[in-house]
Amino acid sequence: MDESKAIRRRRECEACGYRFTTFEKVEEMPLIVVKKDGSREEFSREKVLRGLIRACEKRPVPLDVLEGIVFSIEKELRRQGNAEVKSEGVGEMVMERLAEIDDVAYVRFASVYRQFKDINVFIEELKDLLKKEDEL
């Protein structure tokens, strides 16, 4: 839970005296993702995180880094103020951030996300990645 958006309260049951903690969270407007086929679904942090974890399997990328990526993507999407976002935009944001932390994870994610049709498209993506690294 994001502590900056939640209020922690200690409470006590009037009937039995049991003490417990509750969290009050600001209810945000739902963020809707418009998929390639036109269908819509609510933005899912868990779904984005699962994709990142899969791309980073057996890579030296800590889970907290991946959670930070998901947090920053959702924060940026909400800051933009649009109730609906295209899935392509979310995918591009994920790829931008993966390219900064792990090249292999980036290529894994891109190969699934961009659905490379053949090896030539894959090679072009690798060339683009190498160009970006040379520019840095």
Image (cartoon, helix red, strand yellow):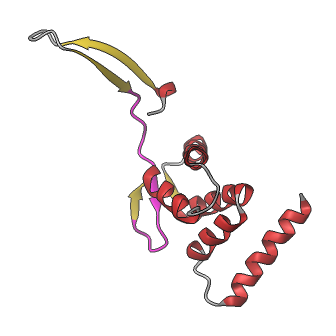
On the picture, is 116 further left or further right than 100?
left
Q: Is residue 129 above or below residue 72?
A: below
The kind of secondary structure the magenta stretch mainly shows is: loop
Which quadrant would the C terminus be assigned to in this image? bottom right
> Given the current orientation, which residue lies at the most extreme left position?
15
Q: Identify the residue at image location x=68%, y=55%.
A: 97
Which stretch did the figure color magenta? Answer: 25-39
In the foreground, 56 or 22: 56
Can I make out residue 86 in this image?
no
On the picture, is 28 further left or further right than 133?
left
On the picture, is 57 further left or further right than 107?
left
Answer whether residue 37 is magenta in the image: yes
* x and y percentages locating residue 29 in the rendered image: 42, 40
* x and y percentages locating residue 17 in the rendered image: 15, 9
* x and y percentages locating residue 89 in the rendered image: 60, 61
* x and y percentages locating residue 3 in the rendered image: 48, 26
In the foreground, 50 or 45: 50
Which quadrant would the N terminus be assigned to in this image? top left
Q: Quadrant of residue 98?
A: bottom right
Can I make out residue 56 in this image?
yes
Q: Identify the residue at image location x=57%, y=47%.
A: 77
In the foreground, 19 or 84: 19
Q: Identify the residue at image location x=35%, y=24%.
A: 23
Q: Identify the residue at image location x=38%, y=19%.
A: 8
Q: Quadrant of residue 93?
A: bottom right
